Every structure is written in C-alpha cells, then in structure tokens.
Image (cartoon, grey):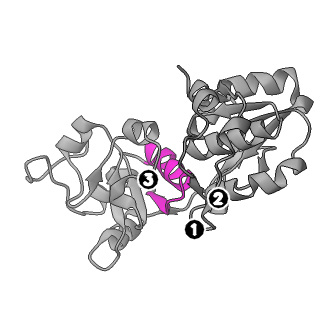
Amino acid sequence: MSFADIIETEGLGDHSHLAGGAERAVAVDPPREAVRACRAGTFTGLARALDRDPDGTVVLDVRRDSERAAGHLEGSVRIPLHEVRARAAELPAGTVWVHCAAGARAAAAASLLAAAGREVVLVHEALDAATGAGLPVVSPARARVTARQARARTGPRGGAVLLDVREEDEWRAGHAPGAVHLPLSALLAGDGVPEAVRDREAVVVCRSGQRSQKGARALAGRGARAVDVEGGMRAWARAGYPVVDEHGNPGTIA
C-alpha cells in the first residue's frame, strides 16, 4: 500500500496535525469524509510532468521561510502549510505537485487540496532528490569557513558541532577530537536534522571539502544552521590541529 493509499482510505486520522513550526501551529485535518484520493509521486515523475505539460503542472512548496531560503525548486509556488486552506484558490490551474522537506506536511497539504477538488500528487521525498531528478534547484551560496575558523567555532567557547561526513574507514584512520561522525550517505538518507546538531550550528567537514558542501546544503534545507570547512580535514591537519584515530592515538587523514 502506498502512502497515498493510506491518505485515501484513512484520511489523516482522528488526530489534528500541527504545522507551521515556529511560524505558527494550527490544526490542518480536513473532515474525513471530504478527503479524496491523492496520487503518490517522485521528483523524477515531476520532471517528466513538467516536460510533458509545463503549463498544466503546478509545484507547491509548503515548507517554512527558513527552509525555502536554503534552497527551492525553480518556479515553485510557496504557501506554508498553515495557510494552504485559506489560499488554495491562489494556485494556478493544473495538477498540483506538493512537497515539503520529508513528506509529512506535504501529505497534510495534499489532503486539504484534494478535499477542495484539486488534482494532487504527493511527493514524499526529501528535496535532495530533486537535483538527482534533473530539476533546477535555486540555492544560495553556502557559507564556508577555514580550518582555523572551524576550530574556533567548535571549541569550548564556540558552541558549534564539528560534523564529519566521511566514511567509516576514513573516520577510524583519523578525525578531529570531539567531532561527531555521520557519513554523508546516512545524512542524505535521513529526513530531519540529526540530534547532535539540533539547536546548534553544524560545521560540516569531509576530506577535501566537496562532500561537506552537500552535507551543509542538506542540513540548511531542513532548517538547520550549517557551514562547511574549505579544504576539509586535509586543511585541518595542515594547520597542525590534532587528529586522532579510533583508539585515541595520533591519526592520519586517509
């Protein structure tokens, strides 16, 4: 059974869904009898729909302002979830493809729009998948820091978390003391903000600075504060900062 089938047969259940985060929290459950079927879709499917019928395909982003500012689909319409019911009439004619950061808010918005008679496709994927589907994502230039700045920000007086997104073998060979390890593949596969960097700035580091940019973009897209280290752990080691292996002995950068 697909996620859309669950929406069709069960509505959103008997519990109100809270949406809006820091902006506003409101109940968005439509009446159970009013909920209509929603199709499940992917960003790859959206790319095909835009190729076939660009004028008849509407992309709706229901994330918060802070999330959208970190990156959004080119040409998408932004209406936060708590305003969807009141502003549904503002959406252009056509099939509405609705997405958020991970799918839960998009599901609520899709149900509201379907109940209002719109043809809706629910995209239950993180925005990271849009780039892989060939969709243009508008992203601001990500802030980068030097190894020296990274050490200062993640030191006792800085308060930030050094998040190492390299693979397990790289981490075991050598990493910065006190860093938190989360491979990029695991970060991108997740939906939310890792617990280690909730309410704290993430200073993302890899070996040379390429993977860390992807990690910082992913975190920023989920509403976290994130920068990445230019030059990565190579630059960290060149600056003479400590590197330890899995046993706490002097390590090397693989």
Q: Mark 2 points at which residue?
A: 64
Mark 3: few/some/many CA within 10 Å (<14, 14-19, 20+): some
Q: Nearer the viewer, residue 146 or 99?
A: 99
The amino acid type of the residue labelled 3 equals Val
Q: Name the residue under label 3.
A: 193
Q: Does the magenta stretch include residue 218?
A: yes
Q: Which mark is residue 68?
A: none
Mark 2: few/some/many CA within 10 Å (<14, 14-19, 20+): many
Q: Mark 1 points at which residue?
A: 22
Q: Is residue 25 above or below residue 17?
A: below
**Residue occupying image coordinates x 77% and y 41%:** 113
Which residues fall within the magenta stretch? 209-228
Q: Quadrant of residue 160?
A: bottom left
Q: Does the magenta stretch include residue 210?
A: yes
Q: Nearer the viewer, residue 31 or 143?
A: 31
Secondary structure beneath label 2: loop
Task: Identify the mark nearer the N-term, 1 or 3.
Answer: 1
